[in-house]
Image (cartoon, rainbow, N blue to C red):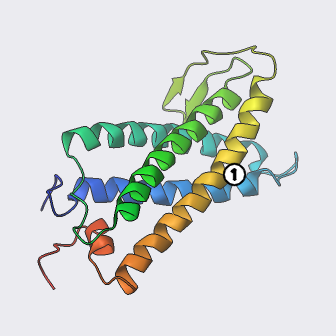
Amino acid sequence: MLLKNTSTRFGHISVLIHWLVALAVYGMFGLGLWMVTLSYYDTWYHRAPELHKSIGIFLFIVMAVRVIWRFISPPPKPLASYSLFTRISSILVHLTLYIVLFGILISGYLISTADGEAISVFGWFEIPATLTEQGIQADTAGVIHLYFAWIVVVISLLHGLAALKHHFIDRDITLKRMFGCNPDKK
């Protein structure tokens, strides 16, 4: 089992974090869209936001680990077949995804704590409110949260389409590397 990245492939920890974040982001996006449609008398009216907040806190932790892991175990080198455009756009897309994801998580925290209440994470522990009573904090953070959520979904879909393009059109090992496959094996 390859835990750390090598110069040619991603290790299992990077692969696990990548797909865990992807699953969480799409799950949270769906949950967010669904929960804003709930009426006050719906059973999930209070449960869905609590679940959304708890998963959001864990996603923030996973993203922090992901950033640290990139320094501990740098990603593989770009393939020699990549054009300059591909190399630059890859860096910009990844950087944008990181910034927007952290923007979503921080704005979610600011929405959730605007009233001064801590965030209970599955009832296991609480994240205290730090910035409160900042005027229109919840409204401003809510707008940022909504737009960033759509941005991350659109960019991640384009990211996925680019990986499929590499696999089916360019016939390179980009997608195989993201599944932790050994690029030397056919």
* Quadrant of the drawing holding the C terminus: bottom left
Residue named by callout 1: 32
Can residue 26 be seen in the rendering of this structure?
Answer: no
Q: For the point 58% across and 32% down, which residue is it?
A: 106
Horizontal and vertical percent position of residue 117: 67, 20
Give x and y (percent) for residue 26.
Answer: 57, 60
Q: Quadrant of residue 68?
A: top left
Q: Is residue 81 left or right of residue 102?
A: left
Q: Residue at x 12, y 62 (%)?
A: 1
**What is the residue that sits farthest to the front in this orientation?**
84
Residue 132, percent across and down? 70, 15
In this rendered view, identify the residue nearer to me: 109 or 144: 144
Residue 22 visible to the viewer: yes
Q: Is residue 138 above or below residue 180?
A: above
The answer to which of 53 and 66 lies nearer the viewer is 66
x 44%, y 46%: residue: 95
User: Is 177 in front, or is 34?
Assistant: 177
Q: Residues within 10 Å of mark 1 (few under 14, many from 20)?
A: some
